[in-house]
Amino acid sequence: MSRLFYYFLILNSLMGISAAHAQQTGGLVRVDFYTDVFLANTDKSMFVHIAEPTTKQELLNAYRKIDSGGYKQLIDSLLEYKEKHELNDWLYYQLVRRVAQQISPKELNYASYTFYKWFMMVKSGYDAQLALTPEKIIFYVYNDEDISDIPFFMVEGKKYMCLNYHDYPKTDLNVNPPLPVNIKVPGAAHAFSYKVTRMPDFKPEHYEEKKLAFVYNHKEYHFSIKLNSAIDSVFRNYPGVDFESYFNIPFSKETYGALIPLLRKNLKGLNQVKGVDYLMRFTRYAFLYENDQKNFGKEKRMAPEETLFSNYSDCDDRVALFFYLVKEMYNLPMIALLYPTHITMAVEFSKPVGDPIVYKGKKYSLCEPTPEKEDLPIGKMAANLKDTPYDIVYQYVPVYRE
């Protein structure tokens, strides 16, 4: 037996002893959640053991036991933390996942881990459901948004998205459809949203600097921006959301403070068209291109801050970053044009540039933020796309405050 394997057995044994002790005594749950620590006491009545594979009756029994016990302090602590740190639903679920991992590590008992996630979500007011196949426990949540690339099922006209599908990546749930476990939880009625409208606060000391450079009008521009590798954990297992939700994912505070003021300085003195041209070429040439299949082995849309952090990015990622920068700097109307194998952006100026794209009576000028064979200026379409049909998948109309 190798020494590494021996240590692995000891670690698993210690994890099992620790979890068993916690289930007998309850105690303090501690989760380091980005910039702050979540702390909460758990009553020993909360701890249940669920056999694997589990059954509907076992889940019902576990719910009845915990529901009649002292779970309220944990839920109150979660909701207080959510409100204090202004967590959107997706980030709140990441906190719930980590708390569940503390209570019942998924490596030791996946059914219990999933049950605790479901319990915390429904007791937090979300309409969530469990479902079972002969060998799997599936966790769904009610969601009324346009989400792609994860399974869902319909119940009485409501769509429930699978929150733990990433744990069964090679499973076709249509072959053995999971059967819902109907547990009625008073107050569990809220829809879950995948919109990320505010990034978490990361600890400043956990940021690292990344150098970027590109050439504009024969002048080389250099950037040193602050990025945090924890951004990857925020969007790990994040699904394909609708374009409005995707394009409006913001930067974190530190990254914003490092990049945006420098861009504003570089744009000073440029008119809107030249300023947008600068942002277009920054997005086009400051990053290396690679398609998602080669980069990740699958399709993956990166948030703007992920694109800054990543070594490679494709057209989806650059369009999202370009949209964010133009919105932040100029807040101009924009439309996204989706081709069968490409996506690009067009911007409405006071006077159109080049051959405009007319949409709902407005004239938009193409701005290609992805490198092409041609060095495309504003208003010019790539030659290979001129006769290709496209759809307008998002229109941004600024709301101006008086």
Image: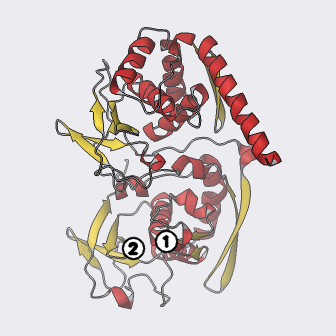
Tell me which amino acid carries mark 2: Thr
Q: Which residue is mark 1?
A: 293
Front in this rendered view, residue 22 or 242: 22
Query: Residue 102: image x %, image y %?
Result: 61, 28
Local secondary structure at mark 2: strand
Q: Residues within 10 Å of mark 1 (few under 14, many from 20)?
A: few
- The amino acid beneath tag 1 is Gln
Q: Quadrant of residue 53?
A: top left
Q: Residue at x 67, y 82 (%)?
A: 219
- Residue 344, labelled with which disc? 2
Badge 1 element: helix
Q: Taking 161 as reference, is 157 left or right?
A: left
Task: Tell me which residue sits at (46%, 72%) in the image.
Answer: 315
Image point 34% across, 53% down: which residue?
A: 172
Question: Which residue is farthest right?
Answer: 3
Marks counted in the figure total 2
Q: Between residues 96 and 138, which one lies in front from this camera angle?
A: 138
Colouring chosen for the image of the structure: secondary structure
Horizontal side, residue 10 vs residue 295: left or right = right
